[in-house]
């Protein structure tokens, strides 16, 4: 049942001055109703896969080493704790890049821990050990193997062979002093009896973490809760302290949601890539996971002021075109040309409270991440859009000029560009500035 409106509280709100307002006065947050404390009963951390799993996307380029180093620094600055720096088993260039990145983490004393992907094969593990020993820095081994029935059938794998290969790979890494995360590919489509055997074998031979993978973006929130519940129960019965990673893809468009659900369900480390780059439709967008958890109040100690820059540098380095409607980074993320929306933002600004203007038509406060609300002029605009646009550029909004721009905007099927409006202004001035016109605002 919908509770009745509290007229007294509404009147009290309207009676407050701008300086007396707080966030709870003007936003009723259903996201936090019934919640006490953190969403998570355990510590969480983040694992960036952009420089490994992300660049497997067929439409991006493998960044140059200078770009990778810049990205590494930015990842550390936004508080990402772990970074996959490559798969050295892929060849010489991969070994060179991994070596340089590991050296930079050491020399620059970056607050980030390196990891490398590897098949459960000594040919992949050995190069990681060699780089680690050369640089003198521990490198976490992310040893992966397919575990779903469809994968086993396609590969003609016997479980006994998989157990043997996994044990050999994990033992070799552990004997050389490297931490190991055992990664079961396609975990979300794997049988529990197979996972139990693989998990037990991995833990027995020294793996300190298990990574549950939604390799093809198959999982839904209900499935994730059941899978992580199963894994937590298994670990509890083993009597060994083992961490749980979540690695998700976005094939159903659930990548970000699933990652947050996985953390709530008990995973303590979440994987993702910046801008969601990755095979097919990509991985979970780590930038969006961080953005959402920050807004939920779960990351009070993380400074995400460089998150926007990290996304932009990633796009440039990987040759990724950011969609105009991409959260936070897209060109339209904080841009409106609708008269009603623009008028509300303008009214909020006139009250002298930046908090109001930044949230009245935005669930993400632009100012928190280094952007600002933008008001454009188009066929769905009101005159207030035009007035705001002109004043923003220190141009006097004469009624006749406002009307000249407004009439052109109404006749077009798109948002007027800067050049188009400037051309109207130039024509208006050269014509002596026609008189007349109304100046009504929404």
Image: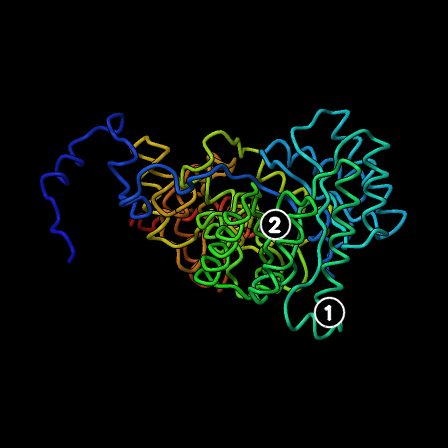
Residue 72: horizontal and vertical position, in percent?
70, 36
> Which residue is labeled 1 in the image?
158
Apparent side of residue 165 relative to residue 42 in the rendered image (left or right): right
- Residue plotted at (62% across, 54% down): 199
Binning the other alpha carbons within 10 Å of mark 1 as few (below 14), some (14 to 19) or many (20 upward) gives few
Apparent side of residue 401 relative to residue 73 in the rendered image (left or right): left
Q: Nearer the viewer, residue 341 or 103?
A: 103
Binning the other alpha carbons within 10 Å of mark 2 as few (below 14), some (14 to 19) or many (20 upward) gives many
- Residue plotted at (39% across, 51% down): 403
Apparent side of residue 423 relative to residue 387 in the rendered image (left or right): right
Give the quadrant of residue 27: top left
How many labels, in total? 2
Q: Determine whether the residue tagged by mark 2 lies in a helix, strand or loop.
A: strand
Q: Nearer the viewer, residue 230 or 363?
A: 230
Whole-Å distance between the Cαs marked 1 and 2?
A: 21 Å
Residue found at the very far right of the displayed protein: 92
Q: Is residue 337 above or below residue 129?
A: below
Residue found at the very far left of the displayed protein: 8
1 and 2 marks in contact (CB < 8 Å): no
Q: Is residue 292 above or below residue 380?
A: above
Apparent side of residue 128 relative to residue 397 in the rendered image (left or right): right
Give the quadrant of residue 47: top right
Q: Determine whether the residue tagged by mark 1 lies in a helix, strand or loop.
A: loop
- Residue plotted at (82% across, 35% down): 100
> Which residue is labeled 2 in the image?
210
């Amino acid at each position: 049942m919908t509770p009745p409106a509290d007229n007294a509280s509404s009147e009290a709100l309207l009676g407050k001055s701008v300086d007396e307002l707080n966030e709870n006065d003007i936003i009723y947050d259903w996201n936090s109703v019934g919640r006490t404390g953190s969403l998570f009963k355990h510590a969480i951390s983040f694992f960036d896969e952009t420089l490994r799993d992300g660049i497997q996307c067929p439409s991006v380029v493998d960044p140059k080493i200078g770009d990778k180093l810049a990205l590494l620094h930015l990842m550390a600055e936004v508080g990402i704790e772990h970074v996959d720096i490559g798969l050295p088993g892929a060849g010489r260039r991969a070994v060179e890049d991994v070596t340089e990145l590991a050296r930079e983490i050491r020399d620059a004393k970056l607050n980030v821990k390196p990891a490398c992907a590897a098949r459960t094969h000594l040919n992949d593990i050995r190069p990681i050990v060699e780089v680690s020993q050369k640089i003198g820095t521990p490198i976490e081994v992310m040893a992966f193997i397919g575990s779903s029935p469809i994968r086993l059938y396609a590969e003609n794998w016997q479980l006994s062979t998989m157990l043997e290969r996994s044990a050999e790979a994990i033992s070799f890494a552990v004997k050389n002093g490297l931490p190991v995360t055992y990664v079961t590919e396609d975990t979300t489509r794997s049988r529990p009896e197979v996972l139990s055997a693989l998990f037990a074998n991995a833990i027995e031979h020294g793996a300190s973490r298990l990574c549950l993978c939604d390799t093809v973006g198959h999982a839904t929130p209900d499935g994730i809760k059941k899978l992580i519940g199963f894994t937590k129960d298994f670990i509890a019965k083993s009597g060994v302290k083992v961490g749980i990673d979540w690695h998700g893809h976005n094939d159903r468009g659930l990548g970000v949601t699933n990652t947050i659900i996985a953390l709530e369900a008990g995973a303590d480390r979440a994987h993702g890539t910046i801008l969601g780059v990755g095979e097919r439709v990509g991985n979970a967008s780590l930038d969006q996971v961080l953005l959402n958890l920050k807004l939920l109040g779960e990351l009070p100690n993380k400074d995400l002021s460089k998150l926007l820059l990290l996304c932009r540098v990633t796009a440039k380095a990987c040759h990724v075109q950011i969609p105009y409607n991409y959260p936070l980074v897209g060109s339209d993320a904080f841009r409106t040309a609708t008269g009603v929306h623009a008028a509300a933002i303008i009214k909020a600004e006139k009250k002298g409270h930046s908090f109001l203007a930044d949230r009245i038509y935005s669930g993400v406060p632009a100012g928190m991440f280094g952007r600002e609300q933008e008001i454009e002029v188009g066929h769905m605009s009101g005159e207030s859009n035009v007035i705001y646009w002109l004043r923003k550029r220190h141009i006097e909004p004469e009624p006749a000029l406002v009307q000249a721009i407004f009439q052109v905007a109404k006749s077009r099927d798109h948002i007027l560009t800067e050049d188009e409006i400037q051309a109207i202004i130039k024509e208006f001035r050269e014509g002596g500035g026609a008189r007349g016109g109304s100046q009504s605002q929404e």
